[in-house]
């Protein structure tokens, strides 16, 4: 359980050749994580090799793709380690503010649901694709779902959620929902491990005074190509304001979008463009409403949605 209260480490790639073969969309060539083996391009990822003269005792195998070189990198990998501080009090305050009732009363269940929509899974791990309205312990470890086929408009699991951006599954261009889309996603996977650091807040079982301590996540991942995997996922997907959302393929100043709990029906979304103010107050989450409506109003997304 990480500090924001979510179960982590559920979704992992399956390394081809280690026995498990399902779900097929998660079976990734070993070379994506282990150097000296074929990767998802059926090529060998760049790695350090040596001239045979540098290996006089012949300890190293020859590189399969460069027989005149010795494979120093074979069976190695690259580890990314990041210490990511989490402002847990700030996060909770934000959730509380965005979900309070009109009379100012806090709504803790709504705050948890809003957090779940930011992540794309419930605190217990269930994906919003399969359980959009409440956490479901039976689905805590379930990971064999898709986005384009099951939730093409992001009405269950918001486009802007963390998991939908960090592993878009079958929803990548140019042919969302196709085997080609899944194949593109397979070139951007990570073997992740998260370890929280710092004490929990006193209200969560931490010691008195712990509210003044730093806390967060030690994010670790293994990958064969840091630029194409870790850096790509972080910069081109997760931190990119125009990736994955009604704003996909468009330019806008909006940071991300989250549809509201229970989903915006396509017909409701289509009306956003004609009168933003008509919905003021009728959506539980102001910010989510505005970004969704702004997107549809500016780019005519409603025209592409069936009623
Ligand atoms: C404090 C920062 C972060 C927190 C609290 C966090 C938390 C989470 C949680 C709770 C999950 C869902 C569990 C799961 O599906 O395994 C998740 C999934 C994931 N996160 Fe993060 N994460 C953080 C930063 C990052 C960063 C920096 C990256 C990569 C650059 C990343 C990449 C991923 C990926 C690839 C998944 C799996 C998505 C999937 O396969 O469906 N996360 N994260």
Image: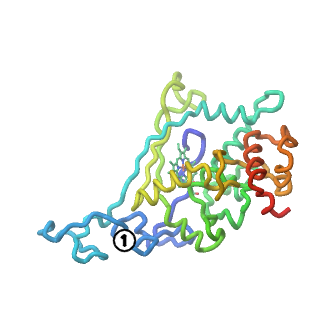
Looking at the image, residue 289 sits to the left or right of residue 143; the answer is right
The C terminus: image quadrant: bottom right
Up-down relation of residue 2 to residue 128 (above or below)? above
Task: Give the quarter of the image for residue 226.
Answer: bottom left
Up-down relation of residue 196 to residue 43 (above or below)? above
Looking at the image, residue 256 sits to the left or right of residue 222; the answer is right
Looking at the image, residue 7 sits to the left or right of residue 44; the answer is right
Label 1: which secondary element: loop
Residue at the top extreme, as displayed: 209
Up-down relation of residue 303 to residue 197 (above or below)? below
Looking at the image, residue 15 sits to the left or right of residue 153; the answer is left
Residue at the right extreme, as displayed: 278
At a point 44% along the width and 53% down the height, the residue shown is: 221
* Colour scheme in use: rainbow
> Which residue, given by chain and number where applicable, does mark 1 sit on?
44
At a point 61% along the width and 65% down the height, the residue shown is: 172
The N terminus: image quadrant: top right
Image spot of residue 91 (x, y percent): 62, 35
């Amino acid at each position: 359980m990480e500090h924001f209260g979510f179960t982590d480490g559920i979704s992992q790639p399956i390394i081809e050749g280690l026995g498990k073969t399902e779900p097929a969309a998660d079976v990734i060539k070993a070379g994506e994580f282990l150097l000296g083996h074929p990767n998802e391009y059926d090529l060998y990822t760049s790695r350090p090799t040596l001239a045979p003269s540098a290996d006089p005792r012949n300890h190293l195998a020859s590189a399969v793709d460069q027989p005149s070189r010795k494979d120093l990198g074979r069976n190695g990998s690259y580890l990314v380690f990041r210490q990511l501080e989490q402002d847990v009090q700030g996060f909770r305050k934000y959730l509380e503010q965005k979900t309070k009732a009109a009379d100012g009363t806090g709504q803790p269940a709504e705050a948890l649901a809003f957090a779940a929509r930011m992540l794309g899974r419930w605190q217990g791990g269930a994906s919003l694709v399969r359980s959009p309205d409440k956490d479901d312990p039976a689905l805590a470890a379930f990971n064999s779902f898709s986005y384009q086929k099951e939730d093409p408009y992001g009405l269950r699991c918001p486009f802007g959620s963390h998991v939908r951006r960090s592993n878009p599954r079958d929803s990548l261009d140019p042919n969302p929902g196709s085997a080609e889309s899944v194949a593109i996603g397979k070139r951007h996977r990570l073997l992740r491990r998260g370890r929280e650091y710092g004490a929990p807040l006193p209200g969560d079982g931490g010691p008195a005074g712990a509210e003044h301590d730093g806390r967060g996540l030690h994010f670790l991942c293994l990958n064969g190509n840091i630029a194409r995997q870790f850096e790509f996922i972080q910069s081109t997907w997760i931190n990119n304001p125009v990736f994955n959302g009604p704003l996909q393929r468009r330019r806008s100043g909006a940071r991300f979008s989250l549809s509201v709990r229970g989903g915006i029906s396509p017909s409701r979304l289509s009306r956003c463009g004609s009168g933003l103010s008509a919905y003021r107050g009728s959506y539980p989450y102001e910010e989510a409403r505005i970004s969704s409506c702004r997107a549809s109003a500016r780019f005519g997304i409603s025209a592409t949605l069936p009623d």
